[in-house]
Amino acid sequence: MQRPSRQHPIPNPSLLMALSLPSPAPVREDCWTLDDTSTLIQAWGERHIDLNRGSLKHKHWQEIANAVNSSHGHERKSIRTAIQCKNRIDTLKRKYKIEKARIQESGGSYVCAWPFFSCLDDLIGNNHKASTPVAISNCKAAPVTTPRLSLFSKVPVAPRSGTKKRRSTHVYRSFCDSYLRRDVISNENEGKNGMESDNSLSSSRFKDREAGYRKLAEAIGTITDIYERVEVAKQRHMIELEMQRMQFVKDLEYQRMQLLMEMQLQIQKIKRARRASGADCYS
């Protein structure tokens, strides 16, 4: 009896195309996409202005996390916490300071291509502009083209419709991977510059301290010389006074001896005169 031949199912072309694509590199679970970051900045900027640019509390960060999750928290890995939102804002602030410093050092010749610079400049720049809700809502990330996106240019894309479609996950992850690497490199450069400034500051402090010690040593040496000269002059004066005292005692003793000798001579003369007068009387 002849067995019926098995019919193998024809694979789906889209499945074969997806399998032929290279698997994306592993990235961090807290990778932020452009849309996530844009929503985060909008939610944070509204509360930042409502609090008169003051510091946000934990409940505010929780509200920001809820706003981000309500728009982009479709997957479990894409759910953000309040701490992740705060850390992301701190990273964006550091990035803004680096780009701002580059623009100031270049004298305006450097053009920042970072999509969130103008929005953060309105919120935390030195010249605070009157940011309105309309301006914050326009804080959208401009589309950024990276070399890694060209890997997916051969994949056929359906024509765009009136509704906005979500981009592919691996494109976002590849962009976030390169973006995080740029942030790490910029943070390392900022750390090196900070270490160099700290080293220069410590060396200047050491030089100032060394100069102070040198002046102190010179002052102590000057005081020692003055004290030595005073002591030498004092001893010389004491010796002179002692010599004058000894000379005075010597002169006084000499005068006393002269007086005694004169008195002895006078006494001898008186005795001789008496003897001579007594002899004359007996004769």
Image (cartoon, rainbow, N blue to C red):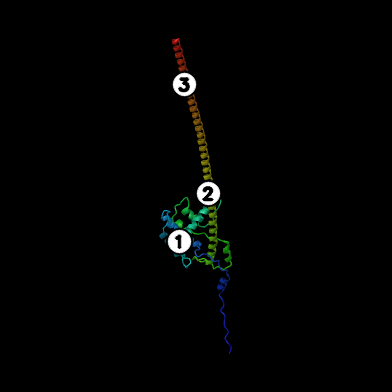
Q: Which residue is mark 2?
A: 202
Towards the viewer: 265 or 251? 265
Could you tell me if the residues under marks 3 and 2 are in contact, i.e. CB atoms within 8 Å?
Answer: no
Question: In the image as oriented, which residue stretches furthest toward the front?
Answer: 283
Could you tell me if the residues under marks 1 and 3 are in contact, i.e. CB atoms within 8 Å?
Answer: no
**Badge 1 amino acid:** Ile
Q: Secondary structure at mark 1?
A: helix
Q: Is residue 202 visible?
A: yes
| Residue drawn where x is 54% and y is 63% of the image | 177
Towards the viewer: 239 or 211? 239
Q: Is residue 67 above or below residue 18?
A: above
Q: Which residue is mark 1?
A: 83
Left or right relative to 107: residue 55: left
Q: Secondary structure at mark 3?
A: helix
Splitting the image into 4 quarters, where does residue 4 fall?
A: bottom right
Q: Which residue is mark 3?
A: 260
Q: N-terminal of the two: label 3 or label 2?
A: 2
Q: Position of residue 265 (x, y in %)?
A: 47, 18
Q: Is residue 168 visible?
A: no
**Badge 2 amino acid:** Ser
**Badge 3 amino acid:** Leu
Mark 1 crowd level (few <14, some 14–19, many ≥20, 10 Å Cα): few
Rounded to the nearest angstrom, the CA distance separating label 3 from label 2 is 86 Å
Mark 3 crowd level (few <14, some 14–19, many ≥20, 10 Å Cα): few
Question: In the image as oriented, which residue stretches furthest toward the top?
Answer: 283
| Residue drawn where x is 45% and y is 64% of the image | 69
The image quadrant where one finds the N terminus is bottom right
